[in-house]
């Protein structure tokens, strides 16, 4: 049991005034020629003190209620299920390209069998269907990130956000800002479940050194994990490709550099290289497994407010006092 | 206030004063009751010549009739001005007292009787006293001097101080009070006034006897002691209170009976005709 606190303890200084009914009679008085032969009625005497004590108690409970007593709720360790997944979907121009290897002639004609973004979308929608316990939010980005669907239980919004995402080149891919926006979704939310930033992108962008530090701190602050579904065609460099990233800029494959950078950020990180739809599905299944584990978290219980009970007591007493006022004799006659 | 009829008070004894009035006196003088027949030499008034007695007398004396003087009575009103007299229930108690005294003043003047007033609370009020005289303006005096009278004091023992101021001859004395006095007070006062004809006028208010509220809560404040009493009115309390009232009236009655009088009870407004009826011995 926690100690009792008051939200406005200064109001307790009003408590001495609660004794005022003991000075006043409170009931209508009538002059009477002589009380010497008035019957000594014990019930009346008790009632007299009863009325005054009732008035005192009413005031006391009102003052205490106004001072708003409460006890701190404390914390409780709970086990959470499901995950909070923010899908950070790349909709840069390169995502509109075909996922699988294609005849260059056909490609030149503009015939795309299955674009990367479309494949990602289909699989992500399936992921959402398979995981009803999770909460989804969507950020799409190309040159700048757009917070399309906030992290909420409104899945229809997230689905619509995914469906509406189309590849569109604007020349620049603001990956780090998209990640930051996705992380901002966790702001002011209690940590109740695994937090996952699901980056679906084909890379081809860079994160500067100062942005890297910001990202590191944000991931740490929000205790989020990162998963990168690296959507690419087979002839791109694999992320596994051992490359010396200290080489001059431009000489290093950007995706390999990005992978190294994510690895260096310190949060749980996994990358999935996907270059076919089946691969994409495998990656999603893997994500499901990874986020399925239950989360233990400290739940801060809300503080217990007792003012309402005092208000209820005061209401009750006021009702009784009101009734007593009703039965009070207004004029001393029949 | 409606015009009240005169109060025809009546006494069973003869006043001894030489002041002409309406009652049968004990001294010879102009009256309507034959006292004796006396020789003309003793009362040289040929208008009262008694021819039959004179003709019957073998010694040829001339006789005249002699009558008792119709003498004036002295009517004295003692008014209790303790705080309890200020009670205002259905009626203003002191206004009733004033009304009784006023009607007595008017009636006394009409009967040619002397009228006097003494008021007393804890002490006798010597500034507001009217010695018994045939006084035409006694009624006006009452209106003037009772209007701003202070009703205070927790008892009316000042009435004992009034006794020496009263005439030594028997008078008709009214005591106007609610008789909420201590045990035996009324009896000892009546003893001191035993040579007078005393009529205790007991003022009551319906709201303290049979017209009390049926139920509810209130605080009653004693106008004499200032003590408060929380009251939850209900049937049992009402029963107890009416029993207490009856006991009070009974105690006043028994105190009066010892000295051969009985109280005249005014419940609410004063009715002059009922006081006349009281003197006729009709009311219970």
Image (cartoon, coloured by chain):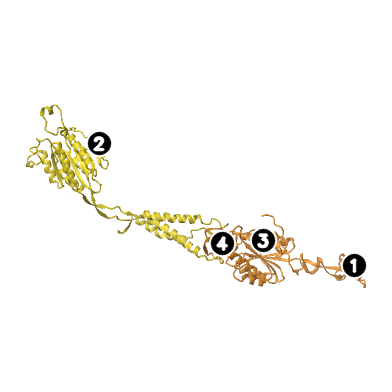
Chain colours: A yellow, B orange
Q: Is B39 on the left-hand or right-hand side of A140?
A: right
Quadrant position of residue B234: bottom right
CA gap between label 3 and label 2 equals: 101 Å
Q: Which residue is drawn at 56% across and 61% down?
A: B238
* CB atoms of marks 4 and 3 within 8 Å: no
Question: Disc 2 sits on a residue from what chain?
Answer: A
Image disc number at residue A164: none
Question: Disc 4 sits on a residue from what chain?
Answer: B
Q: Do labels 4 and 2 share a chain?
A: no
Question: Disc 1 sits on a residue from what chain?
Answer: B
From the top left corner, tell me how far across and down residue B164 is, in percent. Answer: 66, 71
Helix, strand or loop at label 1? It is helix
From the top left corner, tell me how far across and down residue A73 is, in percent. Answer: 29, 55
CA gap between label 2 and label 1 equals: 148 Å
Residue occupied by mark 3: B100
From the top left corner, tell me how far across and down residue B64 is, in percent. Answer: 87, 68
CA gap between label 4 and label 1 equals: 72 Å
Residue occupied by mark 1: B52
């Amino acid at each position: 049991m926690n100690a009792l606190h008051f939200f406005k303890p200064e109001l307790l200084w009003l408590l001495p005034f609660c004794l005022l009914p003991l000075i006043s009679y409170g009931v209508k008085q009538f002059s009477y020629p002589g009380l010497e032969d008035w019957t000594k009625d014990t019930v009346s005497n008790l009632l007299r003190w009863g009325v005054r004590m009732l008035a005192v108690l009413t005031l006391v409970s009102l003052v205490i209620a106004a001072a708003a007593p409460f006890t701190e709720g404390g914390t409780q360790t709970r086990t959470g299920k499901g995950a909070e997944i923010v899908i950070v979907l790349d909709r840069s121009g390169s995502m509109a390209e075909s996922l699988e290897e294609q005849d260059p002639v056909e490609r030149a004609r503009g015939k795309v069998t299955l674009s990367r973004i479309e494949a990602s979308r289909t699989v992500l929608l399936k992921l959402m269907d398979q995981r009803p316990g999770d909460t989804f939010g969507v950020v799409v980005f190309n040159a700048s990130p757009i917070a399309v669907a906030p992290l909420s239980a409104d899945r229809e919004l997230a689905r619509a956000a995914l469906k509406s995402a189309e590849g569109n080149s604007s020349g620049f891919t603001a990956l780090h800002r998209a990640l930051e926006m996705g992380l901002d979704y966790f702001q002011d939310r209690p940590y109740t479940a695994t937090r996952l930033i699901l980056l679906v992108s084909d890379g081809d962008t860079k994160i500067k050194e100062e942005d890297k530090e910001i990202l590191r701190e944000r991931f740490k602050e929000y205790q989020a994990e990162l998963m990168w579904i690296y959507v690419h065609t087979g002839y791109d460099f694999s992320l596994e490709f051992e490359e010396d990233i200290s080489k001059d800029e431009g000489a290093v494959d950007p995706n390999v550099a990005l992978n190294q950078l994510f690895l260096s950020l310190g949060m749980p990180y996994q990358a999935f290289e996907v270059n076919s739809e089946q691969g994409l599905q495998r990656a999603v299944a893997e994500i499901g497994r990874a986020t399925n584990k239950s989360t233990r978290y400290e739940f801060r219980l809300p503080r217990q407010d007792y003012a309402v009970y005092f208000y209820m007591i005061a209401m009750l007493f006021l009702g009784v006092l009101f009734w007593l006022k009703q039965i009070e004799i207004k004029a001393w006659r029949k | 206030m409606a015009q009240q009829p005169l109060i025809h008070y009546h006494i069973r004894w003869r006043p001894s004063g030489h002041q002409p009035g309406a009652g049968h006196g004990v001294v010879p003088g102009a009256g309507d009751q034959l006292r004796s027949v006396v020789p003309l030499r003793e009362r040289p008034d040929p208008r009262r010549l008694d021819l039959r007695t004179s003709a019957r007398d073998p010694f040829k004396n001339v006789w005249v009739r002699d009558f008792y003087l119709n003498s004036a009575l002295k009517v004295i009103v003692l008014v209790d001005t303790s705080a309890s007299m200020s009670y205002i229930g259905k009626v203003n108690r002191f206004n009733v007292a004033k009304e009784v005294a006023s009607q007595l003043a008017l009636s006394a003047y009409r009967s040619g009787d002397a009228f006097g007033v003494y008021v007393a609370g804890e002490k006798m009020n010597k500034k507001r006293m009217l010695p018994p005289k045939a006084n035409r303006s006694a009624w006006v005096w009452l209106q003037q001097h009772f209007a701003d009278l202070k009703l205070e004091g927790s008892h009316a023992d000042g009435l004992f101080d009034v006794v020496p101021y009263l005439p030594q001859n028997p008078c008709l004395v009214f005591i106007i009070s609610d008789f909420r006095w201590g045990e035996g007070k009324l009896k000892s006062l009546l003893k001191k006034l035993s040579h007078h004809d005393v009529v205790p006028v007991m003022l009551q208010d319906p709201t303290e006897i049979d017209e009390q509220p049926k139920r509810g809560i209130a605080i009653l404040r004693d106008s004499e002691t200032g003590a408060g009493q929380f009251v939850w009115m209900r049937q049992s309390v009402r029963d107890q209170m009416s029993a207490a009232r009856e006991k009070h009236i009974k105690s006043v009655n028994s105190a009066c009976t010892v000295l051969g009088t009985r109280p005249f009870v005014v419940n609410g407004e004063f009715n002059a005709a009922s006081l006349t009826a009281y003197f006729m011995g009709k009311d219970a």
